[in-house]
Image (cartoon, rainbow, N blue to C red):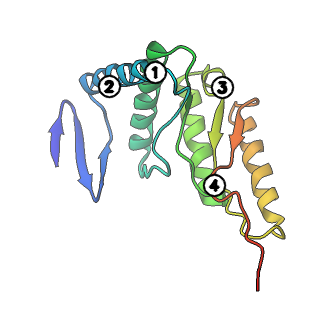
Amino acid sequence: NADIGKGKVRREGYEWRDEHYPEEFLLWEETNVCAVVKRHPEVRHWALNTEPDHQTAAERDAFVQLLLRIYKGMKEGNPDADLMPYGAYNMFQQGRASVLDMMRRIKRADPNADKIFPYIEIHTYRELPERPEVEDDLVAFVDGLRDAGYPDIKVKTGEGGYYMPLVN
């Protein structure tokens, strides 16, 4: 464990966990994101890590603050750029609940979040076309986004949006 500012940062496996990001770190992150986005105007769509593992409510709230500072730096670097607000999870009930919880936290931190984040991603993993529960999961996810205050957010289903026909 290492103390940074007023918060504790601890290393677990390959991830850093933080229940509080010091202002110096948030400003550093915002400034660096601004520089990177400015250096790459050809990139219009940005995303953060996929399947983040925030265990505690404090870690989730800290990540929301970091996310909003990253968004601010990105817009300073390129006002036309978009940011996917949260890394995707698999669309089963537990993964869906985790993403929706984070989206509610983001909305509480910034009531205009539904206007600043145009899309989100979720992993569908439809291995066969005969899996109608995948549609039920997707409907539940979209309904959950509406309930969380994101009526117009677009849903991307990049990873796992496939099926493989059986071939002999």
Indicate the quadrant containing the C terminus: top left, top right, bottom left or bottom right: bottom right
Near-viewer residue (160 or 136): 160
State the mark number for residue 74: 1
| Label located before the other in sequence (2 or 1) | 2
| Label located before the other in sequence (2 or 3) | 2
Q: Left or right of 63: which side holds 168?
A: right
Residues tagged 4 and 3 counted as in contact (Cβ below 8 A): no
State the mark number for residue 123: 4
| Label located before the other in sequence (4 or 3) | 3
| Label located before the other in sequence (2 or 4) | 2
Q: Nearer the viewer, mark 2 or mark 1?
A: 1
Disc 3 target residue: 114
As shown in the figure, which amino acid type bears the numbered disc 1? Met
Q: Left or right of 14: which side holds 102?
A: right
As shown in the figure, which amino acid type bears the numbered disc 2? Leu
Residue drawn at (55%, 34%) of the image: 85
Residue drawn at (72%, 43%) of the image: 144
Vertical position of residue 107 compared to residue 158: above or below: above
As measured in the structure, the alpha-carbon distance from the residue carrying label 4 to the one carrying label 3 is: 21 Å
As measured in the structure, the alpha-carbon distance from the residue carrying label 2 to the one carrying label 4 is: 29 Å
Vertical position of residue 2 compared to residue 127: above or below: above
Residue at the limit of the structure toward the front, as seen here: 168
Residue 30: give x, y in percent of width and height.
Answer: 36, 22
Disc 2 target residue: 26
